[in-house]
Amino acid sequence: MLDIAVIIASTREGSLGATVGRWFLDQAGRRSDLRLDVMDLARTPLPPLQPGPSGDPGHEARALAARVGAADGFVVVTPEYNRGYPAILKLAIDAARHEWAAKPVCFVSYGGHSGGLRAVEQLRLVFAELHVVSLRDTVSFHRVTDRFDESGRLIEPDGANGAAKVMLDQLIWWGTTLREGREARPYAL
Ligand SMILES: Cc1cc2nc3c(=O)[nH]c(=O)nc-3n(C[C@H](O)[C@H](O)[C@H](O)COP(=O)(O)O)c2cc1C
């Protein structure tokens, strides 16, 4: 069993993040080799934006870091806002440090014309700083508002379902390989 944290990054009211996230969790839930921890940032207590002077990261950051530490890999489901990823996602990423290291991350992105891919490119830089391996292949929904029907079902599912399978196969390879590596030799930061 591989422990995968699925981070749903959008917290906007009426967000499509829940719809895209539900579709992805349905795909990932079919894999018997994955145990999923859904970190929906709309429902996850997050560290304060303006922390006090004590230097204590706070219980929200500690709880988030523990969940990151328990995972063997990550999937980030993210929209694109003004060519970037949501600010709240950065707050969540920065809540942990060594807990991220030597693990894989992959992306399900969505947006208007760009399909969220420019947000993903920025996230690759952020995760590189944390020693996280970002996978080449992504699942991306451009013009996301046209892609799901009123009940939240993907209108033309074949392409996205196929892309999710490829990405999950790669995530499992990296997640398993890096877990074995961490167990064999501690990763030096
Ligand atoms: C403030 C704002 C900025 C946006 N900027 C972009 C953008 O730069 N590129 C893009 O493709 N879509 C952009 N969009 C479209 C969103 O990606 C799309 O509406 C998506 O559904 C937003 O995710 P959400 O529903 O989870 O909030 C933007 C939407 C908002 C509200």
Image (spheres, rainbow, N blue to C red):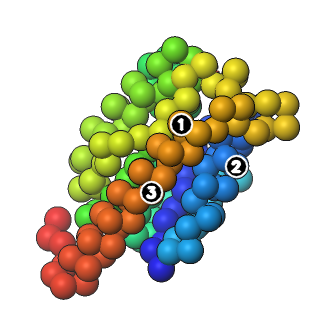
> Crowding near pointer 1: few (<14 within 10 Å), some, many (20+)?
few
The disc labelled 2 sits on which kind of residue? Arg
The disc labelled 1 sits on which kind of residue? Gly
**Which label's residue is closer to the chain start, 1 or 3?**
1
Q: Say which residue label 1 marks.
A: 159
Q: What residue sits 56% from the left and 74% below the top?
A: 32
Between the C-alphas of marks 1 and 3, the distance is: 14 Å
- Report which quarter residue 19 is drawn in: top right
Label 3: element kind: helix
Q: Nearer the viewer, residue 43 or 37?
A: 37
User: Residue 20 location in percent, x, y?
Assistant: 65, 40
Q: Is residue 161 left or right of residue 53?
A: right
Badge 3 residue CB within 8 Å of ligand 1: no
User: Residue 124 location in percent, x, y?
Assistant: 31, 40
Label 1: element kind: helix
121, above or below 164, in the image: above
Label 2: element kind: helix
Q: Is residue 136 left or right of residue 6?
A: left
* Residue 67 at least partly seen: no
39, above or below 59, in the image: above
Q: Say which residue label 3 marks.
A: 168
Asked if the residues shown at circle 2 and circle 3 are in contact, with their CB atoms under 8 angstroms apart, the answer is no
**Which label's residue is closer to the chain start, 2 or 1?**
2
Q: What residue sits 70% from the left and 36% below the top?
A: 154
Q: Nearer the viewer, mark 2 or mark 1?
A: 1
Q: Nearer the viewer, mark 2 or mark 3?
A: 3
Q: Nearer the viewer, residue 100 or 154?
A: 154
Q: What residue sits 63% from the left and 25% below the top?
A: 144
The disc labelled 3 sits on which kind of residue? Leu
